[in-house]
Amino acid sequence: MRKTLVAALATISAVALTACSTGATPSASGPASSGGATEKVKIGIAIPAGNETFWTGWIKGAQDEAAKLNVELVISDAKNDAQTMNDQVNTMIVSGIKGLAVASADPTANKAAAQAATDAGIKMITSNRSLDMPYGGVGGANPIVHTGFNDLQMGGFQGDLLIKACEGKDPCKVALQVGTLGATPQVNRSKGLKDKIASVPSIKIVMEETNSFDPVKAADVTATMLQKDKNIDFMLAQTDPEALAAATVIKEQGLEGKIGVIGIGGSLEGTQAVASGKMFGTVRVSGHDDGATSVRTITALVRGEEIKVDTTGERPTVIVDALVITKDNAAANPGDW
């Protein structure tokens, strides 16, 4: 085991910081502090892809919140490899963390991270990406709660945008690009979208391909889709970077204005694209707020403070709000990642 952990330590990609503030006021959607707890704690955060634009904003939010809460924060980057994430979690546990938040690279393979935290007596939550296992809830087993956006809701919001965009078109032909197959955002955003448009028979998804949440691959997928059929009305992607890549290819092929693009994420570039008309719409989520909520929640649990949890869904969740963005409100709601 020691050799394994040493090897993991050699490969871990991590950012650590020590904060020095004495407290913070939680947001309405986050933990409710009982006040007075200022003892420094060491918290581990395992993320799947630190080089992706959303996750850079997420990390900044986590670091800012750690500074407010007097938390020593260690962040590992699995580079989308589930086994690497499990190894990194083991390394953080050995380093003495008191709490752990995991945004899984794989919802099944990374269940081992929850078990490792349980074996070490460490409180653990999931953030942004969930695990395919039961959640214990406050006072229960790991994972205790989930923090993040409601991906079903986000997919439904994208469906609302599509329904609005398709008004008067029958049929309204749609090409859908989904993210990494099996990842919880891909699964739930797809379900939310399809459930929402199921009642509108004129909307037809005529093509569906994965871009693995990779803008470069999204550009290739867009070109392939357009080779198959240029007579589509809208192209959807499950995050803004991929939607923007699709919009660029559509413009290069002289189809801007003929094929609309709808994303999810509400990134800085995404909201600007909606404001300018390059994209029809997006669903704004704040990477900064998502990361901050993760740190705030696990810190509160470690310190024995209260948190506000939504228990109406399939797992107890501290929800980070999302917002539908169209040209009408894009300028007033710029992205933060």
Image: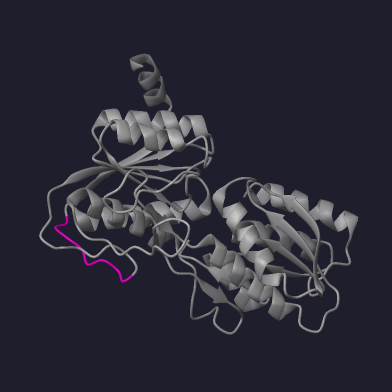
Magenta residues (range): 21-28
- Asked if residue 29 shows in the view, the reply is yes
Q: Residue furthest top?
A: 3
Instruction: Give the image quarter of residue 250.
Output: bottom right
Residue at left offset 40%, top offset 48%: 135
x 49%, y 70%: residue: 322
Q: Position of residue 191 (x, y in %)?
A: 64, 60
Front-most of residues 240 and 188:
188
Report whether residue 278 is seen: no
Q: How is the image coloured?
A: one colour
Q: Position of residue 175 (x, y in %)?
A: 78, 61
Q: Horizontally, is 172 left or right of 215 in the view? A: right
Residue 90 lies within the magenta run:
no
Q: Quadrant of residue 147?
A: bottom left
Q: Who's the residue at 36% across and 29% down the image?
A: 90
Which secondary structure class fits the magenta region best? Answer: loop
Location of residue 137 with respect to 104 vertically, above or below: below
Q: Is residue 250 left or right of residue 314?
A: right
| Direction left: furthest residue | 36
**Tally of marks:** 0
Residue 232 in picture, x, y percent from top left: 84, 67
Question: Is residue 320 found left or right of 63 in the rendered image?
Answer: right
Residue 300 in the image, given as x and y percentages of width and height: 23, 55
Vertical placement of 329 versus 3: above or below?
below
User: Which quadrant of the figure contains the N terminus?
Assistant: top left
Is 275 placed left or right of 312 in the picture?
right
Quadrant of residue 21 within the rendered picture = bottom left
Residue at the image point whose x is 37% and y is 14% from the top: 3
* Relative depth, front residue between 45 and 272: 45
As drawn, 67 above or below 162: above
Quick one: 287 or 206, which is closer to the camera? 206
